[in-house]
Image (tube, rainbow, N blue to C red):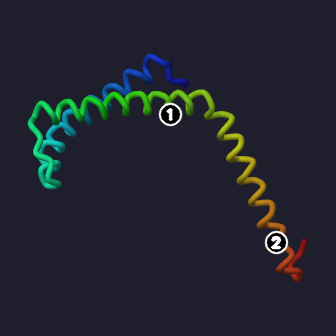
């Protein structure tokens, strides 16, 4: 079943919101360890910027795969088939005593 654009966006935003909450507190706790003393409001702003970037990136990647998955799967299958055919031929050349 193909995922609609709206459902892709809903999934990406939900995932990013969960990550947003975790990241606010992670930034607030971790950044001071590296010498960046941030207030909670600054941690919120930093996390918001990265969340917007993450939503855009995730949505575009998800839509790319949703639109190209069949072509990509066929391409992977062709690569695999070619590899197996070459390896089998090389194996048979290396074992001339076996029945053909």
Q: Picture quarter containing residue 56?
A: top left
Q: Using a 10 Å C-alpha cutoff, classify the residue at mark 2 as few (fewer than 14 neighbours), some (14 to 19) or many (20 or more).
A: few
Q: Which mark is residue 76?
A: none
Q: Picture quarter containing residue 92?
A: bottom right
Q: Quadrant of the N terminus?
A: top right
- Relative side of 76 to 64, left or right: right
Which residue is located at x 10 percent, y 45 percent?
37
Which residue is located at x 26 percent, y 36 percent?
19
- Relative side of 18 to 59, left or right: left
Q: Identify whether 42 is placed above or below 7.
A: below
Which residue is located at x 17 percent, y 44 percent?
26
Q: Quadrant of the C terminus?
A: bottom right
**Mark 2 or 1, nearer chain start:** 1
Total labels: the figure holds: 2
In depth, the one of 49 and 36 nearer the eye is 36
- Residue at mark 2: 90
- Residue at mark 1: 61
- Relative side of 34 to 79, left or right: left
In depth, the one of 8 and 32 nearer the eye is 32
Mark 1 lies on a secondary structure that is helix
Q: Identify whether 55 is placed above or below 96.
A: above
**Mark 2 or mark 1, which is nearer to you?**
1
Q: Identify whether 58 is placed above or below 99.
A: above
- In the rendered image, residue 33, in percent from the top left (x then y), is placed at 13, 55
In depth, the one of 82 and 100 nearer the eye is 82
- In the rendered image, residue 3, in percent from the top left (x then y), is placed at 50, 23
- In the rendered image, residue 25, in percent from the top left (x then y), is placed at 14, 40
Which residue is located at x 70 percent, y 47 percent?
77
- Relative side of 61 to 82, left or right: left
Mark 2 lies on a secondary structure that is helix
* CB-based contact (under 8 Å), mark 2 and mark 1: no
């Amino acid at each position: 079943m193909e995922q609609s654009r709206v459902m892709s966006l809903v999934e990406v935003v939900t995932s990013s919101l969960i990550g947003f909450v975790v990241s606010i507190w992670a930034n607030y706790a971790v950044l001071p360890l590296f010498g960046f003393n941030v207030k909670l409001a600054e941690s919120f702003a930093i996390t918001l910027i990265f969340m917007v970037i993450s939503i855009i990136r995730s949505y575009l990647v998800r839509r790319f795969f949703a639109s190209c998955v069949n072509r990509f799967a066929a391409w992977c299958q062709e690569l695999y088939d070619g590899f197996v055919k070459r390896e089998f031929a090389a194996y048979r050349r290396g074992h001339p005593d076996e029945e053909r």
